[in-house]
Image (cartoon, helix red, strand yellow):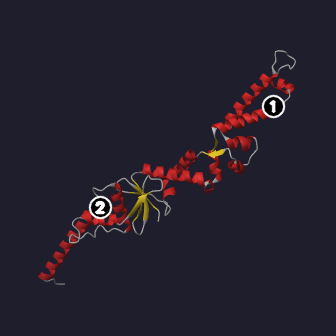
């Protein structure tokens, strides 16, 4: 096929123009968000990925600068504080994200969210897992241990107390009241220590409660700090922050994002 000089000239011109456009687009894409704060940079990068923002759409005749073109898109994105204030919620148009300046902030947000769920709706979590974080306050441990000790030794006769300590009830040097109090104090201390593991004491050792009933007891608490930390460490931050696909998106500026819709 023979090509005329004019056709060859047009072909060369087209190649040159396409090369310039491609180069221009590449430079624009690489410069997206450059020099901006982390929130604006994240918006532009996520907007580019979602297709809500076109880094190649910059028109020199319509905009004074690439910054003005970027700013128009940024201003149209709805931004608000995340639920616990460690990051930002953004609505790009077709997609919504929760973004954080760094992974530490994302971890704190996830931790706060899990703690709130544990406080308000502990039934959402696997009960067999949750039982490992049942605890009792120091005050309640003291009260329960003392009541248990009193109940045991107050019902014992003086002769039984003497037998318990290996003393002769008729020995004038033996004070049964002192012996009773010493036995109470000793048992109270032992029970106090055992109550560090409420499930072991009430369910396994004493058989007083089932796990389900123990968790409903008024004196029982959930160590939400430990439970939340374990949950986030085990399942990952994205499990609790990304309700769309459970993934974490690492951004070029060091920020992290979690899609929510």
Judged from the image, the secondary structure of the residue bearing numbered disc 2 is loop
Asked whether residue 26 is in view, the answer is: no
Residue tagged by mark 1?
A: 154
Which residue: 36% across, 69% down? 52
x and y, in percent, of residue 35 in the image: 27, 55
Asked whether residue 214 is in view, the answer is: yes
Which residue: 83% across, 23% down? 162
x and y, in percent, of residue 245 in the image: 49, 63
Q: Nearer the viewer, mark 1 or mark 2?
A: 1
Judged from the image, the secondary structure of the residue bearing numbered disc 1 is helix
- The answer to whether residue 90 is left or right of residue 22 is right
Q: Nearer the viewer, residue 85 or 49?
A: 85
Mark number displayed over residue 32: 2
- Sequence order check: which comes first, mark 1 or mark 2? 2
Label 2: few (<14), some or many (≥20) within 10 Å? Answer: many
x and y, in percent, of residue 127 in the image: 65, 52
3D distance between C-alphas at marks 1 and 2: 79 Å
């Amino acid at each position: 096929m023979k090509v005329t000089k004019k056709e060859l000239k047009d072909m060369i011109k087209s190649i040159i123009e396409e090369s310039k456009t491609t180069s221009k687009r590449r430079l624009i894409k690489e410069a997206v968000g450059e020099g901006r704060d982390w929130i604006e940079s994240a918006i532009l990068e996520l907007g580019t990925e979602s297709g809500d923002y076109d880094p190649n759409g910059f028109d020199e005749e319509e905009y004074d600068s690439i910054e003005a073109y970027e700013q128009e898109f940024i201003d149209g994105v709805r931004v608000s504080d995340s639920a616990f204030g460690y990051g930002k919620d953004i609505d790009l148009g077709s997609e919504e994200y929760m973004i954080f300046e760094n992974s530490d902030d994302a971890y704190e947000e996830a931790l706060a969210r899990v703690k709130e769920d544990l406080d308000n709706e502990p039934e959402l979590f696997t009960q067999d897992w949750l039982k490992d974080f049942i605890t009792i306050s120091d005050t309640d441990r003291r009260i329960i241990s003392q009541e248990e000790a009193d109940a045991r030794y107050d019902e014992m006769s003086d002769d039984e107390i003497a037998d318990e300590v290996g003393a002769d009830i008729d020995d004038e040097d033996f004070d049964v009241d002192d012996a009773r109090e010493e036995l109470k104090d000793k048992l109270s201390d032992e029970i106090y220590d055992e109550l560090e593991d409420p499930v072991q004491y009430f369910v396994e050792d004493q058989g007083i409660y089932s796990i389900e009933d123990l968790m409903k007891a008024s004196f029982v608490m959930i160590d939400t700090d430990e439970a939340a930390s374990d949950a986030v460490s085990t399942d990952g931050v994205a499990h609790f922050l990304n309700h769309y696909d459970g993934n974490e998106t690492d951004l070029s500026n060091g920020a992290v994002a979690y899609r929510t819709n």
